[in-house]
Image (cartoon, helix red, strand yellow):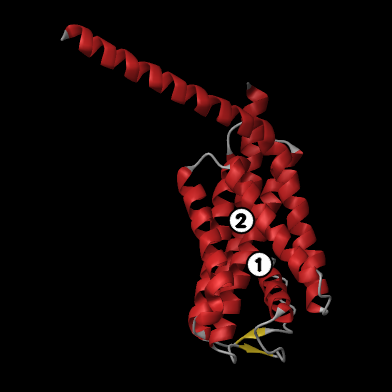
Amino acid sequence: MPRLRLTIGGSQLGWVKVRDGWRGRIHAWQDRIRDPTLTVLLILYLAAIFVALPLAAEGLAIARPVADTMVLAVLAVVVLLSDRRGAVCAMLLALGIIGACLAFGRGWGPTTQIMVRRSGNIVAFSALIWVVGHAVYAPGRITSRRLQGAVVVYLSFAAIFASAFTLIWELKPGAFAHLEIAPPGDAEAAAMLYFSLTTLTTTGYGDIIAVDPLARSLANLESVIGVFYVAITVARLVTLELEDRRR
């Protein structure tokens, strides 16, 4: 009996060491690619938001698939980058929701399809903020890659609120004034992203106006987040840089 106990105990210890070894190698690999990946994420994001989506809104047929591919590439990279199970599960859930909507959405009612698709987008970009924010604010030396990651988080906030505004607009077509675009479509997505970015940056051109109470509330929240995000991010990065210099 003592031998049996000793054998079981040794087997468990050996398994834990192997598991920790695999985890250590995975984490080491993630640490090596984390900084370069932030650059890749930023390039994909900028190309999708400021090039592919506007071209799709102009009617270029190939632009929309390119934009969707870039966004999916961003989400896939985030899954590889993350070592947090909760964020990975949230991202995979979001990808599953988006995939189910694309595959089976035609058989659903229009309201169900709208809510499911926009909810998937919101969950996906929220998980992206979770993962990239952890890389940006982690202790250590401040590099240009971290600043690029901070821009990715900033743009992700704009994407989340754009999805929320689009959802409101699709459910309540009169929620925004001075909009002559009939949802859904690429022009709709581009218009809501434009409104979201001008709100996040507190630019507020006034060409698109939220008149629905819920839309106004979200616009107020986004403007507050935009201001505080910049202030908190600058303060955090300066603090990390000073701590690194003292070492």
Q: Is residue 70 visible?
A: yes
Q: Toward which corner of the image does residue 160 lie, by quadrant? A: bottom right
Residue 215, given in percent of the width and then of the height, sits at 55, 80
Count of numbered circles on the image: 2
Front-lying residue, 128 or 246: 128
Q: Secondary structure at mark 2?
A: helix
Residue 244, given in percent of the width and then of the height, sits at 64, 27
Residue 108, given in percent of the width and then of the height, sits at 49, 81
Front-lying residue, 127 or 247: 127
Specify the quadrant that holds the C terminus.
top right
Give the residue at x 69% y 54%: 73
Q: Residues within 10 Å of mark 2 (few under 14, many from 20)?
A: some
- CA distance separating discs 2 and 1: 10 Å
Q: Toward which corner of the image does residue 179 lie, by quadrant? A: bottom right
Q: Toward which corner of the image does residue 75 lie, by quadrant? A: bottom right
With respect to residue 196, does 178 lie above or below?
below
With respect to residue 171, does 70 lie above or below?
above
| Tag 2 residue | 229
Q: Secondary structure at mark 1?
A: helix
Front-lying residue, 240 or 166: 166
| Marks 2 and 1, the one that precedes in the sequence | 1
Give the residue at x 63% y 45%: 235
Farthest residue, direction top: 3
Specify the quadrant that holds the N terminus.
top left
Amino acid carrying mark 1 in the image = Leu
User: Is 132 situated left or right of 64 in this image?
Assistant: left
| Tag 1 residue | 200
Amino acid carrying mark 2 in the image = Tyr
Give the residue at x 75% y 70%: 64
